């Protein structure tokens, strides 16, 4: 063989060797990434489950606060209505009663 052919063959061997080394590095890097993803997966699942639990607790708390607020407002409205009813009934005097009866009786005649 001539020197040029040997140089060409050596160049091809070096290229092949570099390609194989690069392929090995790529494969090793791919394995490392795959392992890291596998390690992260359980942590991500735990984080998602924890976030769901926290969200449910927050929702329940919000609902309970809304119920308490609605109950307090309802009780306030009922108390105001009772007070107004008492004020109206205390304003009726015997004289007012006679006038009301007279008015009603006039309507019957």
Image (spheres, helix red, strand yellow):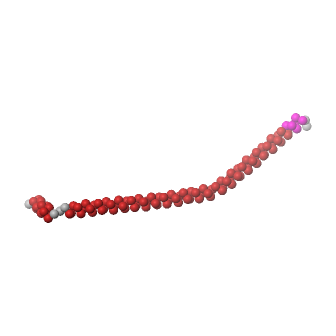
Where is residue 75 drawn, in percent x and y?
33, 62
Where is residue 57 drawn, in percent x and y?
49, 60
- Is 80 left, or right, of 67 in this rendering? left
Q: Is residue 76 magenta?
A: no
The magenta stretch is: 3-8
Where is residue 88 drawn, in percent x and y?
21, 61
Q: Is residue 6 magenta?
A: yes
Outermost residue to the left: 109
What secondary structure predominates along the stretch shown in magenta?
A: helix
Tell me which residue sits at (12%, 61%) in the image: 99
> Residue 101: which quarter of the image?
bottom left
Q: Quadrant of the N terminus?
A: top right
| Count of numbered tags | 0
- Is 28 left, or right, of 61 in this rendering? right
Q: Quadrant of the C terminus?
A: bottom left
For the question of whether residue 101 can be seen, the reply is no
Q: Nearer the viewer, residue 35 or 12?
A: 35
Tell me which residue sits at (78%, 46%) in the image: 21
For the question of whether residue 12 can be seen, the reply is yes
Tell me which residue sits at (66%, 56%) in the image: 39
Where is residue 100 drawn, in percent x and y?
14, 61
- Is 17 left, or right, of 37 in this rendering? right
Above-or-below relation of 11 to 99 = above
Tell me which residue sits at (10%, 61%) in the image: 102
> Residue 12: which quarter of the image?
top right
- Is 96 left, or right, of 48 in this rendering? left
Q: Nearer the viewer, residue 96 or 64?
A: 96
């Amino acid at each position: 063989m001539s020197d040029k052919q040997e140089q060409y063959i050596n160049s091809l061997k070096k290229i092949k060797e570099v390609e194989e080394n690069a392929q090995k590095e790529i494969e090793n890097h791919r394995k490392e990434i795959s392992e890291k993803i596998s390690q992260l997966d359980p942590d991500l699942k735990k984080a998602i489950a924890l976030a769901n639990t926290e969200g449910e607790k927050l929702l329940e708390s919000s609902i309970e606060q809304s119920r308490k607020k609605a109950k307090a407002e309802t009780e306030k409205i009922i108390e105001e209505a009772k007070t107004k009813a008492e004020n109206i009934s205390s304003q009726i005097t015997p004289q007012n009663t006679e006038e009301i009866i007279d008015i009603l009786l006039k309507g019957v005649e």
